Amino acid sequence: MSCLLHIQDWYRKHIRNSFTIHKEKIKYLSKIVAATDSKVVMSSSWRGGFWNVPYEEKTDDQKLLTDLLNKYNIEVIDITPKSSDGRRDKEILSWLSKHQNEVDNFVILDDECFDLECFKDTHLVQTSSVKKGKLIMCPWFKNRGLKRKHMRRAIWILNNKDLIDLPAHN
């Protein structure tokens, strides 16, 4: 039992804290929104607990995210639908297809790109490190998350590229 407690303590210290909301990353997102007059559509795993859940029923992390988004005037206008196979490329393409008359450009900010390959060279800003073509998925790895260079890239994509044909998905 003491080993289990040790693992739980290690998890809390090393892994759990790596998934917390970071104010500086929300600031970068707010700069992207302000510089491009963009709106936010949430496609992350946070969307279920974030969207249409009364504030009082949110977890502490969800409340913190809500508070920071409000503080920095970031409005989440929608969430992507869930696909039967959980592929985010399909979910994003489905949302874009439904809202094609409202969207003239988009960018995807994500640290995981395994199912977003079709957006790789056009609309994806990957916010994690890649080594030898493979994604480093360690949650405690220091190079994860939105940084200034990602913010600049996202702003460039949103301000300087016309919407290209949406990629096909299989």
Image (cartoon, grey):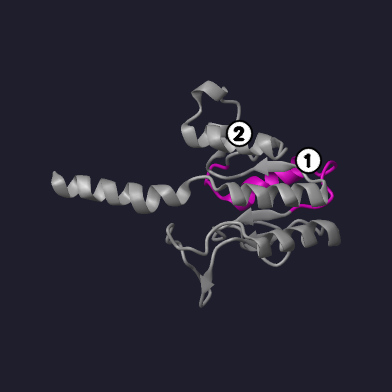
Judge left or right: residue 112 versus residue 167.
left
Query: Image quadrant for the N terminus?
Result: top left
Residue 52 locus on image (x, y percent):
60, 26
Which residue of the protein is positioned furthest toward the left in this rendering? Answer: 1
Disc 1 marks a residue whose amino acid type is His
Q: Would you say residue 71 is visible in this rendering? A: yes
Say what secondary structure mark 2 lies in: helix
Which residue is pictured at 57% across the width and 22% down the height?
54
Query: Image quadrant for the C terminus?
Result: bottom right
Disc 2 marks a residue whose amino acid type is Asp
Q: Give the residue number, with chain letter if any, for mark 1.
A: 99
Residue 53 locus on image (x, y percent):
56, 25
Q: Is residue 97 magenta?
A: yes
Q: Are marks 2 and 1 in contact (CB under 8 Å)?
A: no
Which segment did they paint magenta? 83-106
Disc number for residue 67: 2
Q: Considering only order in the chain, which callout, 1 or 2, is on the residue closer to the N terminus?
A: 2
Where 69 falls versus 150 (above or below)?
above
Q: Is residue 156 magenta?
A: no
Which residue of the protein is positioned furthest toward the bottom in this rendering? Answer: 132
Judge left or right: residue 71 versus residue 60.
right
Q: Would you say residue 118 is visible in this rendering? A: no
